Image: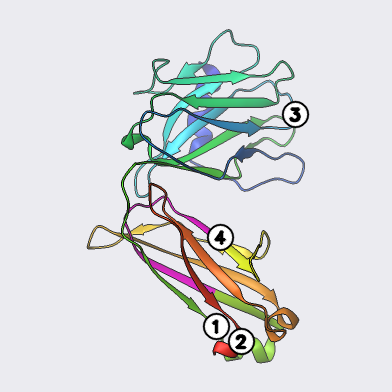
Amino acid sequence: MRRLQGFCCCFLLWLTCVQSQTVDLKPAFLSVNPGQAVTLDCNVEVKDSHSTEFYKEIPGEVPELVVAHYHGWSSPRYGPGFSSSRFSATVNSAGTQYQLTIRNTEARDTAMYYCGKWFTASSSYIHCKSSKLVVSAQEFPSPSVLVLRPSEEELTSKGTATLSCLISKLSIGMTEVTWMANGNSISSGISTGLASKDSDNTYSLSSYLKVPMADWNGGKIYSCQVQQGGAQSATTKEIQKSDC
């Protein structure tokens, strides 16, 4: 119980990754039909004397502790409203790999899931990435996606080019945004915000991609791809220098 209390105290302070330790949760995005099972894998890299927690967050709501587990415990400990009937957590013998499995998924499981851990060496509670889970069989309406070119000020003074992807009319707040260059996925230079709920009960968010000036001037075609999950296919918008 002591470790769970420690979690509650640290829960108020969201810390970014520390170089000496990281926490990695995969996959980044999951879309399943109701009733299917999903498993999230959390790698904490080093064995420690503290538990690892999985928690759930719906945009605009307070995060909830789903389950905590520790390699020295015989069984995991659940947060309020969660139980072993649908949720389970396991840890490998090395104490570095944790798994959260959700069985018989329901629409209410749609959320962002995190794993986090208190590291003694750095005296830090660390979580780094979220997994977005969408549980739905329905087809969502296509969102509005607008890709904007870099500003003239940036192009003339900074030597970089920042592309903006403005997304609105999303049916749910759990959305995967992917940037591509000439059809190839990009993993660096991306900054994507959290979805916010609008007055019409849809969601909107923005994503930004910073690329070298030479790539922008070289005529590469950049794409912003938005995936809501469910039965809906991705919505993609492209831009290149010659379009501007």
- Circle number at residue 178: 4
Mark 2 and mark 3: Cα distance apart in space: 46 Å
Q: Which marked residue is nearer to the observer: mark 2 or mark 3? A: 2
Name the residue rendered at 62%, 48% in the picture. Answer: 16
Dot 4: within a 10 Å radius of its alpha carbon, few (fewer than 14), some, or many (20 or more) residues?
Answer: some
Residue bearing the label numbered 3: 46
What secondary structure is marked by label 2? helix
Residue bearing the label numbered 2: 241
Mark 1 and mark 3: Cα distance apart in space: 43 Å
Which residue is more in the foreground, 177 or 142?
A: 142
What secondary structure is marked by label 4? strand
Mark 3 and mark 4: Cα distance apart in space: 30 Å
- Percent position of residue 70, x then y: 61, 18
Horizontal side of residue 33 vs 40, given as left or right = left
Q: Which residues are magenta?
A: 164-177
Look at the picture and state if 2 lies above or below 167: above
What secondary structure is marked by label 1? loop
Q: Quadrant of residue 25?
A: top right
Horizontal side of residue 238 vs 142, given as left or right = right
Mark 2 and mark 1: Cα distance apart in space: 8 Å
Q: Earlier in the sequence, mark 1 or mark 3?
A: 3
- Marks 3 & 4, CB-CB < 8 Å contact: no
Q: Which marked residue is nearer to the observer: mark 2 or mark 1? A: 2
- Does the magenta portion include 165? yes
- Does the magenta portion include 211? no
Q: Amino acid at mark 2?
A: Lys
